[in-house]
């Protein structure tokens, strides 16, 4: 397809790899924070083109993986409520909470429906006025504006049997938390292209200004990622720290203004709990108080107790880049995509799942 | 989950575009992106156009990489 194939040219990929090898002197640990980057790096064998000086790490870039077990339990409680149609993106179906998964709840009779778009869930509410349709709002800034747009439609049309359970998360506060924890050394960030298409580059400036850490907003094809790595190497070799955009065909420094405006109208930032990272200030999005009628957390009585992850699961360390999946004693033995212990193995974009599928070829 | 792919707008009716992804057609809501016209390439995520694709920038990025290619060989 146009604007995909051109960015997969093998000769250009080799040339970029050679360019990186020639330029790179300092050892660098570069982190990507997007599940689609994780998968693309494996699928296209990008590590094979890089010199030994470059180490690629995966961070908390998979929304499925960072959703707290407590929030999965609350989603399950909603799904099991009589009269509720619980609608979700398919990725969330198999994530284990402490009382099962949405897939298991559906097998036990709950009305759980997978949707492609939040608009499909709103359509259920219109067509089935006696049902209480809840949409599970999961995702980063790429996805949350779509939920805001859907809620605006529900609000303006007065559709009262539609609510959202929002566990949306924000990427920049998570990067700040990673930098301030100092658990691992990060010398540069490959920033997520589609999150950045919405938020622009402003919210990342602290990386350059406060942490002196280079950062490049990257597209998803192999040439995009290689060019981004080359830009990071060039910055590091010159001892510079800037936020640059490689994915210029899609991302503007100012982001998508309308999406940002609608996000602000519907949601407000709150302190939120991430699986593996714990509580991070102002890192989640909840519905603003004036839209409480459309807020599932207000309309339904949800469990408040905290839930524990399986104590053997090391997803937390994987999400922080502190452990590579093959270093986990459970990886590929007890924990596999068919029988996942934790969310990093469940989601197709989870780091453990990507390692499991591609590692032997990487 | 943030997967979003480029497609070509073949038709617009009100707030909805018909977008072709290598020949397969899907509807996409246009409310988050102004000024989309038929023939534009757009990035679609979960039923919404989240950005227009700037074809001039795409070609410039590729040219930059091809320039590198000449340097190496």
Image (cartoon, coloured by chain):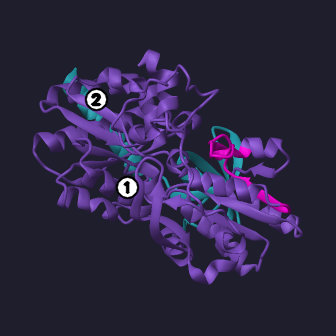
Chain colours: A purple, B cyan
Measuring from the top left, give residue B22's x and y in whole percent: 63, 38
Q: Looking at the image, which residue sits at the far left?
A: A238
Identified at 38% across, 43% down, the residue is A59
Q: Quick check: is A93 in the magenta stretch?
A: yes
Q: Which mark is residue A174?
A: 1
Query: Is residue A349 shown left or right of residue A178?
Result: right
Q: Looking at the image, which residue sits at the far top?
A: A360
Q: Quadrant of the C terminus of chain A?
A: top left
Label 1 Cα neighbours within 10 Å, binned few <14 / some 14-19 / many ≥20: many
Measuring from the top left, give residue A29's x and y in whole percent: 25, 36
Looking at the rendering, the stretch of residues picked out in magenta corresponds to: A82-102
- Residue position for label 2: A16
Q: Chain of mark 2?
A: A
Q: Quick check: is A265 in the magenta stretch?
A: no
Mark 2 or mark 1, which is nearer to you?
A: 1
Query: Is residue A214 shown left or right of residue A252?
Result: left
**Which element type, helix, strand or loop, lies under badge 2?**
helix
Establish if A259 lies above or below A184: below
Q: Chain of mark 1?
A: A
């Amino acid at each position: 397809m146009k604007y995909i194939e051109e960015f997969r040219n093998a000769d250009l990929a080799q040339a970029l790899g050679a360019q990186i090898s020639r330029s790179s002197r300092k050892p660098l640990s570069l982190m990507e924070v997007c599940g689609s980057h994780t998968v693309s790096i494996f699928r296209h064998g990008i590590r094979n083109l890089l010199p030994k000086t470059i180490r690629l790490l995966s961070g908390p870039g998979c929304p499925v993986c960072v959703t707290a077990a407590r929030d999965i339990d609350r989603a399950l409680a909603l799904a099991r409520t009589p009269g509720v149609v619980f609608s979700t993106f398919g990725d969330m179906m198999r994530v284990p909470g402490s009382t099962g998964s949405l897939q298991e709840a559906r097998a036990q009779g709950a009305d759980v429906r997978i949707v492609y778009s939040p608009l499909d869930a709103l359509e259920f509410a219109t067509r089935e006025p006696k049902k209480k349709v809840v949409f599970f709002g999961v995702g980063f800034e790429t996805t949350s504006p779509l939920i805001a747009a859907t809620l605006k439609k529900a609000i303006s049309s007065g559709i009262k049997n539609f609510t959202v359970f929002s566990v949306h998360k924000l990427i920049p506060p998570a990067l700040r938390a990673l930098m301030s924890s100092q658990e691992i050394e990060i010398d540069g960030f490959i920033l997520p292209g589609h999150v950045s298409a919405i938020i622009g580059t402003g919210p990342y400036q602290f990386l350059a200004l406060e942490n002196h850490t280079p950062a490049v907003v990257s597209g998803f094809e192999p040439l995009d990622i290689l060019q981004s790595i080359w830009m990071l190497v060039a910055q590091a070799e010159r001892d510079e720290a800037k936020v640059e955009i490689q994915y210029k065909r899609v991302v503007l420094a100012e982001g998508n203004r309308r999406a940002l405006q609608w996000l602000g109208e519907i949601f407000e930032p709150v302190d939120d709990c991430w699986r593996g990272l714990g509580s991070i200030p102002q890192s989640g999005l909840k519905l603003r108080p004036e839209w409480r009628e459309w807020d599932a957390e207000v309309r339904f009585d949800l469990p408040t107790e905290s839930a524990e992850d399986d104590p053997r699961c090391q997803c937390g360390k994987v999400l922080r880049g502190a452990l590579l999946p093959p270093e986990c004693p459970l990886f590929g033995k007890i924990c596999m995509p068919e029988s996942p212990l934790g969310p990093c193995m469940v989601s197709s974009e989870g780091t453990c799942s990507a390692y499991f599928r591609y590692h032997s070829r990487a | 989950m943030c997967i979003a792919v480029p497609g070509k707008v073949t038709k617009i009716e009100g707030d909805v575009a018909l977008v072709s992804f290598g020949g397969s057609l899907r509807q996409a809501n246009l409310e988050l992106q102004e000024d989309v016209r038929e023939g534009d390439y757009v990035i679609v995520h979960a039923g919404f156009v989240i950005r227009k694709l700037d074809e001039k920038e795409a070609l410039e990025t590729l040219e930059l990489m091809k320039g590198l290619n000449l340097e190496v060989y």
